[in-house]
Image: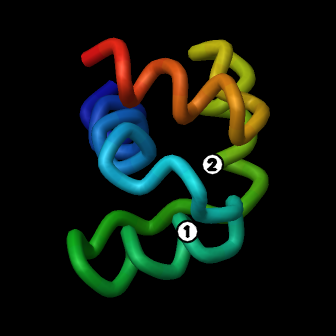
Amino acid sequence: MAIEEAVVQFLIEHPHLGQQEVAMKLTEALAIDISPNGVRSVWLRNNMNTTTLKVEKSQAL
């Protein structure tokens, strides 16, 4: 669950990045090993699967 929380927090801070970029940056910056498909799965579970949804969630918090 800690990985999912880190992904969601990162997405809130960077809502315009794609799943490949998010996976790379999380691996580099936080040493979290997650695949682009793993990022997408987190997006889907948290209703953040489009840029619009990610931006709305980012602005709401």
Q: Which residue is mark 2?
A: 39
**11 to the left or right of 30:** right
Q: Secondary structure at mark 2?
A: helix
Percent x, y of residue 5:
31, 30
Quadrant of residue 27 within the rendered picture: bottom left
Q: Which residue is mark 1?
A: 23
- Count how many numbered circles sit on residues in the image: 2
52 up-or-down from 29: above or below: above
1 up-or-down from 46: above or below: below
Quadrant of the frame with the N terminus: top left
Q: CA distance from mark 2 to mark 1?
A: 7 Å
Quadrant of the frame with the C terminus: top left
Percent x, y of residue 32:
34, 65
Residue 13, numbered label: none
What kind of residue is marked 1? Ala
What kind of residue is marked 2? Val
**57 to the left or right of 37:** left
Q: Residue at x 26, y 74 (%)?
A: 31
- How many other residues sit within 10 Å of disc 2, few (<14), some (14-19) or many (≥20)? many
- How many other residues sit within 10 Å of disc 1, few (<14), some (14-19) or many (≥20)? many
Q: Residue at x 53, y 34 (%)?
A: 55
22 up-or-down from 1: above or below: below
Q: Secondary structure at mark 1?
A: helix
**40 to the left or right of 29:** right
Percent x, y of residue 34:
53, 61
**Does the residue at mark 2 contact the one at mark 1 (Cβ under 8 Å)?**
yes
